[in-house]
Amino acid sequence: MVDDHQIVLDGLMALLKDEQHEIVFSTTNPEEVESLVAQHKIDLLITDIMMPDITGKGNTKAFSAGENSCHFNEWSGCNDERND
């Protein structure tokens, strides 16, 4: 899970853990995603698409192919159409 707001990560992790999902990693730093994905086998990357300096879409493009490929859930609390 990737979001630049720790409170959002905490809330989502609590919801997913209540449903018995395993959280492999979470980070508020999108620049850590590449190394975290390389270290862990993941099935799904949940990422905010509106973060400072990098978009979640940039993260998903980086991991949509290759041995570390996975599914993605992109979301944002922002109602902004500029992130196409």
Image (cartoon, grey):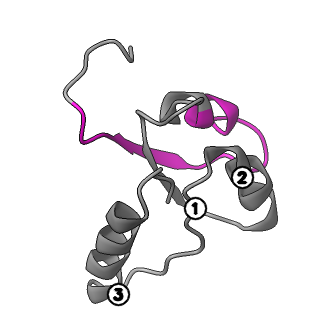
Q: CA distance from mark 2 to mark 3?
A: 25 Å
Q: Look at 27% across and 87% down and name the residue there.
A: 18
Q: Which mark is residue 20?
A: 3
Q: Are marks 2 and 1 in contact (CB under 8 Å)?
A: yes
Q: CA distance from mark 2 to mark 1?
A: 7 Å
The front one of 28 and 18 is 28
Q: Residues within 10 Å of mark 1 (few under 14, many from 20)?
A: some
Q: Residues within 10 Å of mark 3 (few under 14, many from 20)?
A: few
Vertical comparison of 73 with 9: above or below: above
| Residue 66: x %, y % from top left | 77, 40
In the displayed structure image, the side of residue 9 where residue 34 appears, left or right: right
Q: Which residue is mark 1?
A: 27
- Considering only order in the chain, which callout, 1 or 2, is on the residue closer to the N terminus? 1
Q: CA distance from mark 3 to mark 1?
A: 20 Å
Q: Amino acid at mark 1?
A: Thr
| Residue 26: x %, y % from top left | 55, 66
The front one of 41 and 27 is 27
Q: Which residue is mark 2?
A: 32
- Considering only order in the chain, which callout, 3 or 2, is on the residue closer to the N terminus? 3
Furthest toward the left, the residue is: 79
Screen quadrant of the C terminus? top left
Residues drawn in magenta: 59-78
